[in-house]
């Protein structure tokens, strides 16, 4: 079914909980059967190197057809879903995955590639053969470091250095290689416009009727279209994006009451209740 490395906590467990306590985590996964994975998001960044398989990735309303040696950048808090169909091919869906804590990337100034993905509205990077080969070797070095060490040495300096070298090489390639970001994703233009508008106006009035008026759409058609393209209702999407933003604000030192208002909630009780429902804790219980 699946092969994984660095398995003290499984890949599935991280996917389900969405949080990362370590600076990074590496997995090499080979899936021989199709799977139905729901839309979800993480509190960490994800970098995937696709090696083989018939796979797609859905990220914030964009659908990407993946090819071998594509790199997929999934920013923290981005709603996404992988799809693979092993009935169409004899090959496994084989990929290497790095989970990367936001604070870790900030510490080493390695967020540029993830920022570029946001700016270019593309989450898939496709390099020339020579660069892809170099980066594949760098990922294999990380895997070799992990597999060759006893459990007590998993956090060794050598592993960290090889990881940083791989991330630096990837970031540099994203900057120096023209047109490496894939622009062929399938999407519904209206849904992308709605997503962009919501992202730019989380502190404002995002009532369904107001959104429908702004985009000159029937609210029922708008809600149905958005759900079909993203897997989320508009109401749930707005609420969860606001809570995640509020969590970042509070983590940066903003009082919870101020974060409540900055993120579009009109009263603290509804904010606190939504926060608890989504994250499992009250805003006052946050510890960073």
Image (spheres, grey):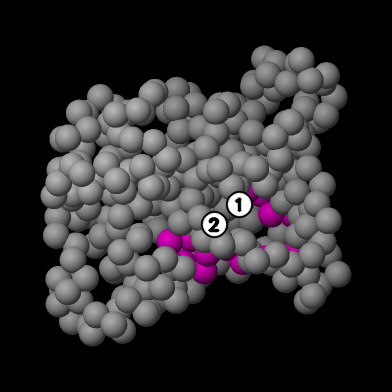
Measuring from the top left, give residue 265's x and y in whole percent.
18, 49
Which residues fall within the magenta stretch? 48-63
- CB contact under 8 Å: marks 1 and 2: yes
Q: Is residue 85 left or right of residue 208?
A: right
Tell me if 130 is positioned left or right of 71 in this view: right
Residue labelled with disc 2 = 124
**Residue 220, quarter of picture:** bottom left
What secondary structure characterizes most of the magenta part?
A: strand
- The quarter of the picture where residue 250 lies is top left
Describe the element under mark 1 as helix, strand or loop. strand
| Residue ID at (79%, 75%) | 87
For the question of whether residue 217 can be seen, the reply is yes
Which of the labelled discs sits on residue 71, or is there none?
1
Q: Is residue 239 above or below residue 219?
A: above
- N-terminal of the pair, mark 1 or mark 2, is 1
- Placement of 141 over or under 11, stated as above or below: above
Give the answer, above or below, for where 278 lies relative to 248. Answer: below
């Amino acid at each position: 079914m699946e092969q994984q490395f660095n398995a003290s906590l499984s890949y599935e467990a991280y996917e389900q909980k969405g949080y990362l306590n370590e600076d990074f985590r590496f997995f090499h996964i080979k899936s021989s059967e199709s799977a139905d994975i729901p839309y979800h998001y993480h509190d960490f960044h994800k970098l995937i190197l696709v090696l083989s398989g018939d796979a797609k990735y859905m990220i914030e309303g964009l659908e990407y057809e993946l090819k071998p040696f594509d790199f997929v950048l999934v920013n923290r808090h981005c709603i996404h879903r992988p799809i693979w169909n092993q009935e169409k091919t004899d090959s496994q869906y084989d990929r290497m995955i790095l989970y990367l804590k936001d604070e870790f990337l900030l510490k080493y100034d390695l967020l540029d590639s993830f920022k570029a993905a946001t700016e270019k509205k593309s989450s898939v990077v496709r390099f020339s053969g020579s660069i892809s080969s170099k980066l594949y070797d760098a990922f294999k070095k990380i895997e070799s470091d992990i597999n060759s060490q006893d459990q007590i040495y998993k956090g060794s300096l050598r592993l960290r250095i090889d990881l940083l070298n791989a991330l630096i090489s990837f970031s540099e390639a994203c900057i120096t290689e023209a047109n490496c970001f894939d622009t062929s994703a399938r999407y519904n233009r209206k849904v992308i416009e709605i997503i962009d508008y919501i992202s730019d106006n989380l502190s404002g009035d995002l009532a369904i009727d107001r959104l429908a008026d702004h985009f000159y759409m029937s609210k029922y058609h708008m809600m149905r279209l958005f759900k079909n393209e993203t897997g989320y209702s508009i109401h749930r999407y707005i609420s969860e994006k606001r809570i995640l933003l509020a969590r970042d604000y509070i983590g940066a030192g903003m009082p919870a009451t101020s974060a409540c208002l900055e993120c579009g909630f009109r009263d603290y009780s509804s904010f606190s209740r939504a926060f608890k429902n989504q994250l499992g804790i009250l805003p006052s219980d946050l510890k960073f």
